[in-house]
Image (cartoon, grey):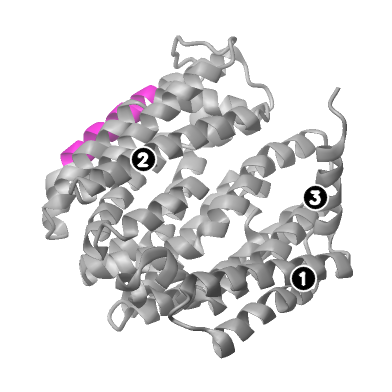
Amino acid sequence: MAINFLGSMWLSRILTPAQIGVFSVAYVITGLLRTLREMGLGTYIVQEPELTDARMRTAFGVSLIVSAAGGLVVLALAIPAAQFYREPGIQTVLVVLGLNFFLVPFGATSMSLMRRNMRFMEIGLIETASALISTIVAVWLAHLGHGYMSLAWSSLVGTLVSVVGVIFFRPSHVPWKPALVEWRRILKVCGYLSGSSLVNYISYSASDLILGRMMTMSAVGYFNRAFGTAGVFSSVIARAMQQVGLPFFAKLHRENEDLRPAFVHATTLVGGLAIPFFAVLMVSAGNVIHLLFGPQWVRSIPLLQILCIASAVEALTYLTNQILSAKGQVQTQWRIDVLGLFVKFGLVIPAALYSLETVALAFVASSVIMNWVRFLALRQFIGIVARDLVTVLAKAAPITVCASTGPALIVFWWDSPRSEVINLMLIAMTAALGWFVAVAAGRHPIRAELVRAWANIRAPKS
């Protein structure tokens, strides 16, 4: 993620908001079919109690068929999508992105099996190599003047690198020969998982889909840059916890363990990281946007500040889908995600008639509503009560205050436009110092995790 973010910083100074907007809209369109292509097969492989050879071969066979169909649909949609959004560049981008669909099946099932077996070191190496090479390609092509196509080609290269890496680390017992003998069992589970992932993705990408039609490609670019910056935490920390969370929760469920303590502990850790992070990011949004992306993105500053609120709210229920998937409650997950889709579109579409700030506020309202819905589901299936979330907030509050006080003082009383690098360095250092002091003094559960990690680092290697 650090590699992707550094690449995004570099590209933001080369490409215009409109060029990034073109790629964003095209990427969202392929993402809809990409979600259908995945069909929840990865989640199925991770949580399946009895993963036989036949079921693995069937997962591979289904993936081959669905991916090929998805690729053909993307190619067929290229011209209509370009006409709908009144942007010819979308057609070319879709053609290149559509080629990804024909590559992915050869690594997807093996990657999911690696997650099931918790081989996270190999997964990390694969993802790092893919991110590094695709970023180098994107920056190189952008410097050569290829605009939004630099992002399209880098995406294809990244997929190819990932597939090669998965094949290299692929478990020897995983069969290559596809089959369809267990398709009924797999589709029974994956039907809901795929539908849930699809509506969740549409909800997540609502801004690109709506703004691309109702506003301009530049508006898409500005909002996408703010949304992407606010999403840095979920892309790094939360994504890592989600990938580990599903195998962990599924293992506990198979062993008939109570999931409530594990969920509360994990959410307390997330809250102690996420809420302070978004408070600091909200305070320093102007410094972050100016320094990382340049003055052409100043329009994204107020959007980022508002979206930090939405992201902080969502941190309390980051792991809900992992809990529901681990318990086999895919229908419940589907219903929640469908409701979230209607809520998001119902709020964002009218908001887009006014301004980008109004759209950002619609995201906040959607986060509040859906957090309550997820809480009700967690209360039903693992016995979560309001006191649990209050405890999470209470433990995060002093850390948030300590972490954001220093940055706030720097921004409001010392900030100087002539020293943006120094400003951001001071903000980062005071935020980190305040966070560490609060974690240590308040004996937050994160403290125990840090002590344990340090002990493991210092332990002599046998």
Residues under labels 3 and 1: Cα distance? 16 Å
- The kind of residue on which mark 2 rests is Ile
Neighbour tally class for label 2: few under 14, some 14-19, many 20 plus, Cα within 10 Å: some
Mark 3 in CB contact with mark 1 (< 8 angstroms) = no
Q: Is residue 52 left or right of residue 92?
A: right
> Which residue bears the numbered disc 1?
386
Percent x, y of residue 180: 45, 17
Residue furthest bottom in the image: 413
Circle 1 crowding by C-alpha within 10 Å: few under 14, some 14–19, many from 20: few
> Where does label 3 land, which residue?
262
Q: Which label lies toward us, 2 or 3?
A: 2
Instruction: Please state which amino acid type lies under the numbered disc 1.
Output: Ala
Q: Is residue 253 left or right of residue 441?
A: left
Q: Residue at coordinates 59% horizontally, 15% vertically from top-left?
A: 171
Observer-side mark, 3 or 1, equals: 3
Q: What are the residue bounds of the magenta stretch?
A: 62-76
How far apart are labels 2 and 3 at the CA level? 40 Å
Residue 291 location, x and y as percent? 43, 68
Q: Nearer the viewer, residue 341 or 264?
A: 264
Residue at image coords 81%, 39%: 457
**Which of disc 1 and disc 3 is earlier in sequence?**
3
User: Residue 304: x and y, percent?
Assistant: 46, 73
Secondary structure mostly seen in the magenta stretch: helix
Secondary structure at badge 1 equals helix
* Residue that badge 2 annotates: 136
- Check disc 3 and give the amino acid type: Ala
Q: Which mark is residue 115?
A: none
Say if the magenta span includes residue 180: no
Assign a secondary structure to mark 3. Answer: helix
> Could you say which quadrant of the image residue 155 lies in?
top left
Instruction: Give the residue at x 58% y 44%.
Output: 330
